[in-house]
Amino acid sequence: MSADDTRRVLPDYDGGSIVNVAASILDAFEVEPPSAPLRPDLLPSSGLAGPGGTVLLVLDALGLSQLDAALSAGCTPQLARLIDMAPLGTQRLTSIFPSTTTAALNSLATACAPAEHGVLGHMLWFEEVGAVVNMLTLYPVGGDTPISEDIVRRVPTVYERLAAACVPSTLITDFAFEGTPFTNLLTEGARFAGYGGLSQIPYQLELALQAADGPAFYSLYWPLIDTLSHFHGPDHAVTPSPACRVEMEFIDLMVGKVADICALHGCTLAVIADHGQTTLYPQRAVSVDGELRAALNRVPGGARRALYLSGVDVERVHADTELSAGLELAIATDEAIAAGWFGGACDGVRSRVGDVIVLAGDGVQLLYDYGHGTYTQSGSHSGLTSQEMVVPLIVVPGD
């Protein structure tokens, strides 16, 4: 991996992150956003407005590095066409910290930084239930009943804000997600339209637009680049992934269909990722074990690229020579908050992120056995490397 790929990239909450994309969507419908819209150099004022509405296509984990690899390979002609049509081409944005799906999708769904919406990672300590909770399932570690999404919900969704202004929203995502606690958290205020496969995304969009009575917001989500990158590794120029390359060919077909539908109905189309992925090497995996594990006062939060440790300090983490050798950084959580990693002071949710944040090094994953054993992945995210943090934004205006 090149030095540029491993450099630390902090979230640009001041107008250059995925939070600000969601704020720009609200701005496009003349609804006051809770955060600043994108800076004018990234998107002109009301740049997401279209006579037929706005379509946001979120391709989970398609960071800028993976997109560049696909474009260089010539396997995404429809995406290349969109970039040519976009007045500003491909824009570089940042994800949020941590650069992980549970936190990032909440930022896209609320136009708020993690410090505001409170979903600060994949695994989080909740004082309300006295346990670390998996934020994708909302199940506490060792528990058999999910916590209520009402415990998690802190701010209105973009969809609720739009509905208050009489602007309807439709979310098009996998039908298997319907009714799950995490999806309920994300989609309050939107109409749910499920799909069973990639080809149904443009079909469901066409149906929604045909039924529309005026401009509306349509949010489309496809997860499989993320899934395949975990299993087979992400597709970067220096670490190719044939599995992800083939997936991109199919995604490209879908993107072309979505773009044609948007043009037909006068919708502005924005294509974005929630975060990227970096390549991991199983032989570099490091387990949190032994004396350090015994020193923790609860199981870690976070994820394998960014763990939250409680009951220890940075000096104690560095005393574990095996773990320390695999780290990019160990930092006191209060210092990370003060540096703006979460986008605010984390008022009311500070306890969720422990005492020390440890970021895994190049190709490293940090493993902790929560009671069901551990497993390695070939790609992951949640850290601050360029591959994990830098995401594309492609905006094609509606006529």
Image: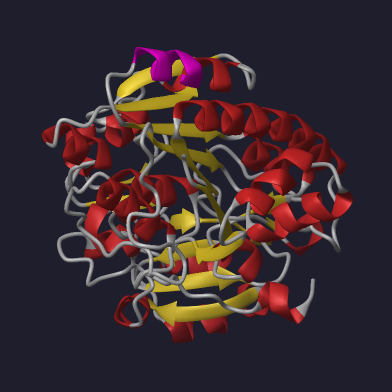
Whether residue 175 sits left or right of residue 25 in the image: it is: right
Q: Main secondary structure of the magenta part?
A: helix
Task: Residue lying at the far front in this picture: please name it.
Answer: 399
Q: Nearer the viewer, residue 330 or 101?
A: 101
Whether residue 301 sits left or right of residue 6 in the image: it is: left
Q: Residue at x 52, y 26 (%)?
A: 264
Whether residue 183 sits left or right of residue 62 in the image: it is: left
> Residue 167, percent across and down?
22, 32
Determine whether 302 is above or below 191 in the image.
below
Does the magenta-highlighted stretch encompass residue 104? no
Judge whether residue 102 can be spotted in this image: yes
> Residue 227, percent across and down?
65, 37
Determine whether 155 is above or below 4 in the image.
above
On-image quarter of the N terminus: bottom right
Q: Which residues are magenta?
A: 205-211
Does the magenta-highlighted stretch encompass residue 208? yes
Q: Nearer the viewer, residue 191 or 178?
A: 191
Task: Residue lying at the far bottom in this picture: please name it.
Answer: 315
Q: Residue at x 50, y 79 (%)?
A: 330
Q: Nearer the viewer, residue 27 or 332?
A: 27
